[in-house]
C-alpha cells in the first residue's frame, strides 16, 4: 500500500473557475477526512465520510464546496467559483472506523493557488 | 468550543539540546490529544497520542508528551535534538465521540549544528 494519495499536487486556477481534487485513501480504511491548511496555520476540519456517507461537515464548507465519496473508496472535493481566499493546501486523511481515535494517515495534500 | 494553543511559533535549539514544544488545550472535558509533525511539502505524520490511561506518552523518534489535566497541557519533549527533527509540529485535540481534529497553529522547530 502506498498510503493516502492526492492529486493533483499543485493546482493554479483563475478566480471564478471550478476545481476538483481527488483523494485515494488506504484501501482498507473506511473513514476519509478533508482538511484545509492556510499558510502559517494548522489544518482546519472540513468534512468526513464513513464509507460513502458524509457524516459531518464544518461550517467552513460553504455551499461552493462539495465533497463526494460515491463508492466508499476514493473521494473528490470540488470548489465552484473559486475565490482568492480559497488558496490553501487541501489535505486528505483516512482511518479505520473503530480504530483508536486519531489514527489518521494524511496524504501530501493538494496546493491550490487562485490568481 | 475546544481550542489548542501552541506557545511559540518558532523554536530554535542546538543539536543535542532538549526540545520542549508547548501545547495547551481548552475543553470542558479532557479530550484526546495528539502531536503531529509536518516536513516541507509533505502531509502530517502522527508522533504520539493520548486517549486514556498513562499520562506520559511515548512516540516515535524519541519524542514523548505528558498530559497534565490540572494545567490543561500536553507539552512535547525530546531529550536530545537531532538535525532531522527540524520540521513543523502541530498539537491537536479531539472531543470524545467526535472525529474532527482541532489543530493548533503550529511550532516550527529549527535545530542548529
Image (cartoon, coloured by chain):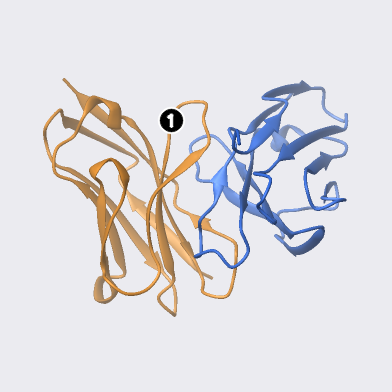
Chain colours: A blue, B orange
Q: Quadrant of residue A31?
A: bottom right
Q: Position of residue A49 (x, y in %)?
A: 74, 58
* Residue occupied by mark 1: B39
Quarter of the picture containing the N terminus of chain A is top right
Indicate left or right for B77 with B28 as reference.
left
Indicate left or right for B108 with A48 as reference.
left
In the displayed orientation, state which residue is furthest to the bottom.
B29
Number of residues whose C-alpha sits closer than 10 Å to that of mark 1, classed few (under 14), some (14–19) or many (20 or more): some
Residue at coordinates 57% horizontally, 75% vertically from top-left? B97
Between A56 and B53, the one lying in front of the other is: B53
Q: Position of residue B65 (x, y in %)?
A: 26, 57
Q: Position of residue B87 (x, y in %)?
A: 36, 32
SS for dot 1: loop
Name the subunit of mark 1: B
Vertical placement of residue A47 versus A25, above or below: below
Indicate left or right for B43 with A24 as reference.
left
Q: Quadrant of residue A13?
A: top right
Counting labels gives 1
Residue at coordinates 51% horizontally, 56% vertically from top-left? A103
Residue at coordinates 72% horizontally, 25% vertically from top-left? A8
Q: Position of residue A10 (x, y in %)?
A: 68, 23
Residue at coordinates 29% horizontally, 27% vertically from top-left? B84
Between B12 and B82, the one lying in front of the other is: B82
Quarter of the picture containing the C terminus of chain A is top right
Amino acid at each position: 500500500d502506498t498510503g493516502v494519495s492526492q492529486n493533483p499536487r499543485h493546482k493554479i486556477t483563475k478566480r471564478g473557475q471550478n476545481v476538483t481534487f481527488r483523494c485515494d485513501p488506504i484501501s482498507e480504511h473506511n473513514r476519509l477526512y478533508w482538511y484545509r491548511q492556510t499558510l502559517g496555520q494548522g489544518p482546519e476540519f472540513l468534512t468526513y465520510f464513513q464509507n460513502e456517507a458524509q457524516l459531518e461537515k464544518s461550517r467552513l464548507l460553504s455551499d461552493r464546496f462539495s465533497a463526494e465519496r460515491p463508492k466508499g473508496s476514493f473521494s473528490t472535493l470540488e470548489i465552484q467559483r473559486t475565490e482568492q481566499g480559497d488558496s490553501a493546501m487541501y489535505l486528505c486523511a483516512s482511518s479505520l472506523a473503530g480504530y483508536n481515535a486519531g489514527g489518521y494517515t494524511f496524504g501530501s495534500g493538494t496546493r491550490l493557488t487562485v490568481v | 468550543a475546544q481550542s489548542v494553543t501552541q506557545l511559540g511559533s518558532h523554536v530554535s535549539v542546538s543539536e543535542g539540546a532538549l526540545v520542549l514544544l508547548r501545547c495547551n488545550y481548552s475543553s470542558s472535558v479532557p479530550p484526546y490529544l495528539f502531536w503531529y509533525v509536518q516536513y516541507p511539502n509533505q502531509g502530517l505524520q502522527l508522533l504520539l497520542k493520548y486517549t486514556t490511561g498513562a499520562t506520559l506518552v511515548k512516540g516515535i523518534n524519541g519524542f514523548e508528551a505528558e498530559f497534565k489535566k490540572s494545567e490543561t497541557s500536553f507539552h512535547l519533549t525530546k531529550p536530545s535534538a537531532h538535525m532531522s527533527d527540524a520540521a513543523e509540529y502541530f498539537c491537536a485535540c479531539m472531543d470524545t465521540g467526535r472525529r474532527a481534529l482541532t489543530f493548533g497553529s503550529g511550532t516550527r522547530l529549527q535545530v542548529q549544528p
